[in-house]
């Protein structure tokens, strides 16, 4: 039986933060911003039936997730990328439906490092 | 150190790699897509280009072909940079004119070694 990957491998996240010269909090905040932005782009692409674009978004986000230690999200996105790239819209849609829960697990794992609730648009930094 | 053009459409991937390369002393130029890459490469004449293959508008393969057809950039080494594990992607990148290929997640020391090797071998190295 394959072990379920962790929502966040903190050692990987920490290593990348150090490599970039960011604090762990800054690294976590950047990843969560990425996740919220890319989840929205992914949903919009699939809603339009733009499978090529969905595959491309999943590809980039998957790579960033791997680098940031968000292992479970990264693996889910790899599957989504493959499905979208092969034109399997229904499978891509089913996998995309699991993305919000996977991101919530990352937010929970990072609770304490960064706020789990996105700031209102008027308070967002540019 | 060298002036590198990083072509990557994912914001976090671009920010992370930019930071890591800058911390090694390189000067980074960035582009978010293939068209943007062509414009920046011709205008800024970087020493080397790191090219993601999965890009909006013009993809990395086509952008590399166009760079190699352009007199101002044809001698600039291009290293393909992608998470693609699909069979044939490496060959397609080399056929398009890439000098080398690195897979994501990036093995950073290995990437630095490839950058150094290609800079040494380039006409401006």
Image (cartoon, helix red, strand yellow):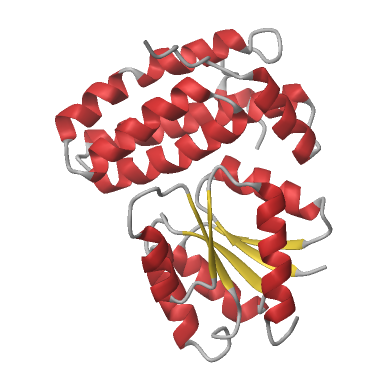
Apparent side of residue B39 relative to residue B85 in the rendered image (left or right) = right
Would you place residue B124 above or below residue A125 in this image? Answer: below
Would you place residue B16 above or below residue A118 in this image? Answer: below
Which of the pair B85/A72 is nearer the observer? Answer: B85
Residue A61 spot, x, y in % from top left: 47, 37
Whether residue B47 appears in this view of the structure is no
**Image quadrant assignment for residue B89:** bottom left
Q: Residue at x 32, y 38 (%)?
A: A81
Q: Residue at x 46, y 35 (%)?
A: A62
Which of the pair A44/A56 is nearer the observer? Answer: A56
Apparent side of residue B11 relative to residue B44 in the rendered image (left or right) = left
Residue B123 spot, x, y in % from top left: 69, 87
Residue A7 spot, x, y in % from top left: 52, 15
Q: Residue at x 46, y 29 (%)?
A: A74
Which of the pair A72/A56 is nearer the observer? Answer: A72
Apparent side of residue A2 relative to residue B39 in the rendered image (left or right) = left
Q: Residue furthest bottom?
A: B71
Q: Quadrant of the N terminus of chain B?
A: bottom right
Residue B85 spot, x, y in % from top left: 39, 48
**Image quadrant assignment for residue A66:** top right
**Image quadrant assignment for residue A34:** top right
Q: Quadrant of the C terminus of chain B?
A: bottom right
């Amino acid at each position: 039986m394959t072990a379920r990957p962790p929502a966040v491998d903190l050692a990987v996240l920490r290593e990348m933060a150090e490599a970039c010269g960011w604090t762990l909090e800054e690294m976590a905040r950047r990843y969560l911003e990425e996740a919220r932005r890319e989840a929205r782009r992914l949903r919009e692409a699939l809603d339009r039936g733009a499978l090529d674009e969905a595959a491309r978004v999943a590809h980039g986000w998957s790579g960033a997730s791997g680098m940031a230690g968000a292992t479970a999200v990264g693996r889910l996105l790899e599957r989504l990328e493959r499905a979208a790239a092969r034109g399997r819209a229904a499978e891509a849609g089913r996998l995309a439906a699991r993305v919000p829960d996977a991101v919530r697990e990352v937010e929970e794992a990072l609770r304490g490092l960064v706020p789990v609730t996105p700031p209102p648009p008027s308070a967002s930094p540019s | 150190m060298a002036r590198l053009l990083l072509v990557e459409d994912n914001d976090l991937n671009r920010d992370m790699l930019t930071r890591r390369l800058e911390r090694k002393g390189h000067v980074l130029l960035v582009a978010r897509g293939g068209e943007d890459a062509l414009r920046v490469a011709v205008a800024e004449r970087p020493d080397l280009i790191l090219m993601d293959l999965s890009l909006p508008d013009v993809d990395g393969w086509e952008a590399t072909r166009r760079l190699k057809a352009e007199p101002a950039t044809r001698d600039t080494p291009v290293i393909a940079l992608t998470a693609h594990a699909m069979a044939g992607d490496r060959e397609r990148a080399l056929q398009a004119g890439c000098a080398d290929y690195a897979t994501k997640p990036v093995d950073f020391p290995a990437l630095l070694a490839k950058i150094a090797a290609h800079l040494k071998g380039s006409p401006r190295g």
